[in-house]
Image: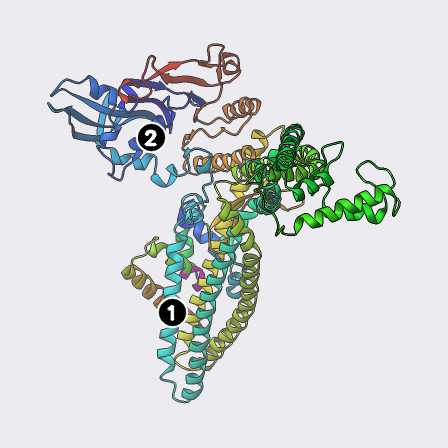
Amino acid sequence: MIIRKIEICNFRSYYKSNTFELINGLNLIIGSNGDGKTTFYEALEWLFRTDGTNKMDGKFISKKRIDELFANESDDVRVAMTYEHKGTVKTLEKMFHFTKSFDGEVSTSNYSYILTEMNGVERTVNDGIRFDYDFPSELRKYTMFKGEGDLDVFQSSNALKMLVETFSDVKDFEAYFAFMEYATKKANQARDNAQKLDKKNTDKIKQLKYTIDRETGMLSDIEREIKNKENEAVNFDGLLKSIEQSKEASKLLISVNRRIETLSQKRSQTRARIDENYTINLLDNMWILMGFSDIAEEYSSKINKIDLKRRKLEQDYLLTAGADKVLKKMQSMKTDFVPLPVHIPGQKIMQEMLDDEVCKICGRPAKKHSEAWEYMLHRLEEYKESLKADEDEEIEPYYKNNYIVELQKRDTTLNDNLSEITKLRKKIQDAIAFNNRLHDEVKKIDANLDLEFEQKKRILAQTDGLSEEQLLANYESISNWIDLKNKAENRIEILKRQRSKHREELENAQEALSKLAEGTSAAIYAMTALIIRQISDAFKTARETNKKRLLHAIEDESNIFLDKLNTNDFKGTIRILEKANGQGEVVLMNNDNTRIFHPNTALRTTYLMSVLFAISKLSSEKDKTEIPLLFDAPTSSFTEAKESEFFNVISTLNKQVIIVTKSFLKENANHEIVLDRIKVNEISGRVFRIEKKKPFDDKNLTTIQTVISKIK
Amino acid sequence: MTNKERMLHMVLDDKSLQELYNYDESEYEDLYTAINSENVVVASVARIIKHLDGSTDESDQKKVYMTVFNYINENYIL
């Protein structure tokens, strides 16, 4: 079957009529995102659907066309394909009518699906479902592929079975296999019934039948368990394979998480050490006094002046008061100078000076009993006297309150602490510097944390949609799954050994039963049952041979295609395996027969496409009819150079291939997407460009229209 | 070669069957020759393939079984 022309009319972005004239070779349809590539594919899918579903879906109708229609106006959605099949030109057409009502609603009607055949001047019209004869739906599974994810035909569990039924040398083995099972059962029953008449050997027959029933039952249980365990093993294998790639990522993630935790803890601890309660420290730690030394000096100077004045006034007052005691007292106080208040220096200081025999104010020695020492002693005694309550005091004190004295005492205290105050500046500077160092440390930790979070993002971005929880859970699960898989496989081995043993027992019992029948009327029934059993085994073997032949044929052809598609690259060897549960699997092997588990996407695409080309070739050899292959964006993972090479190889395969792709588009200086004409000219085949007609509003579907240009 | 003939060849190609029932697979090109063979097993295989015709219908299975069963019963010499 060669497709000559495809017409798409009012189907989604294909406004009104659009035509693709195709060749028997490579046909490229190039478009960017949203230009109509997938719509092209979906139009054909709709056209080929022969099961009667999705006939008149409103979502197929071009929004632009609907928008243009007046009330009560109609048009058609139509997709048609003209093709050549076994020398006859045919056109398959599917369409329906749509009408816009007054309130803007769209209704559909007049669905039709026809296949028109041109035989010279004669034209025959049939129901479109007859297209299945030319292009059976089982075949279509192996010809139309949407994206790289769709290329693995063995993904579905039934695929291998369908492949064998469709493409193997011998069809319908399954029906014969089912028949042989039925026939074996019936023949055994007939034998058993015949042997019931053998009275001589009744007991032996009974025992053998019991053995046969028992062994048959056990074999059935064992087969069932083997199948379950095989499915289990396949499932765990699948699970392990699915996380094979993420195993590394899981490990990395765990170590990144650990580092993040450590760094976060360190950050918290460092942050906790930062104390920037400067406001509180102003009062609590007397930081407010930092600039106080100047003030303290000034205070000291001022308070001493005031105190001096106070003492002078007090002195004058007391003198003026004229009391003998006071006079005497004053006289005793009278000196050439205004004496210091009695409490200065303090009692302790004075005692210290006396003990050390030195005046610590002027620094001169005051040996015991010297004039200076006596003076100091007298001062101390005066101070002690002053502490005693004066019972004879008659004269009112000059100052009722001692505010100035208090202030003076404070000055003393301040001066004692002045050295502490001068140290405050350094203390504060050190505290601020310490906090700044801690801030810097936190910044460094933050920078490291950012790196770790970036690393984590990268890990998660490359794990095929697995979340962090899944990755971590997977890591935990790995050893569990390995263990369970091994257990299942070990159990399978044990069961297989048991199966062999029970098969032997069954065979022996069958043989013994048949032998018993010898010389009796049941002999022929026993022989018939035996022959049917043996024929059944032969059918079983033939079925396996049939399957293997097909798989080897596909493998051989696939490797030839792979060789062509990957001429200058690493290839590997394609093998098609049958898994325990009957599902097929396409794998790539190294030269040393080890499996390549994670080929890069481009290699995966080429080896899967090689299998598809091989199947297509086998199909055409069997039925003497070519079937086209249609791929939607299969090469998105290829480099540009690889793409050109790939397409050129496909153009030499003598096969009709239609590829819808984003390849060969580039951005020009005006940031517009344009075709790379130079690269396109290097391709052998037909090339179309599809793109949205400009101008268009990317938020308004009614402005979207795909236009087709034939490039070469 | 038809599908049935290919199936016939594949089943008769079974080495155990050949040894047990002593026939040469290459002598049976087509179903007609096989059905008319003197070798009961060869003829039975051919009958199964021809009469079942790929059917999975129970009544067809029953018919074919009776045909083959009776054929073997009547023609196999112990």
Type of amino acid at the residue the image marks with label 1: Lys
Q: Position of residue A363 (x, y in %)?
A: 84, 37
Give the mark nearer the N terminus: 1 vs 2.
Answer: 2
Instruction: Give the residue at mark 2.
Output: A42
Give the crowd class for mark 1: few <14, some 14-19, many >=20 residues within 10 Å.
some
Q: Position of residue A639 (x, y in %)?
A: 56, 25
- Secondary structure, mark 1, is helix
Q: Give, as a single range, the part of the protein colored magenta.
A: B38-44
* Camera-side residue of A635 and B56: A635
Where residue A439 appears, x then y in whole percent?
62, 35
Q: Where does the C terminus of chain B fall, quadrant-wise?
A: bottom left
Q: How is the image coloured?
A: rainbow
Residue drawn at the location 54% of the way across and 64% of the way down: A492
Inspect this view and state whether residue A166 appears: yes
Q: Amino acid at mark 2?
A: Glu
Q: Is residue A419 above or below residue A496?
A: above
Apparent side of residue A12 relative to residue A428 in the rendered image (left or right): left
Residue bearing the label numbered 1: A185
- Parent chain of label 1: A
Q: How many marks?
A: 2
Which of the 4 image quadrants contains residue A699? top left
> Principal SS element in the magenta part?
helix
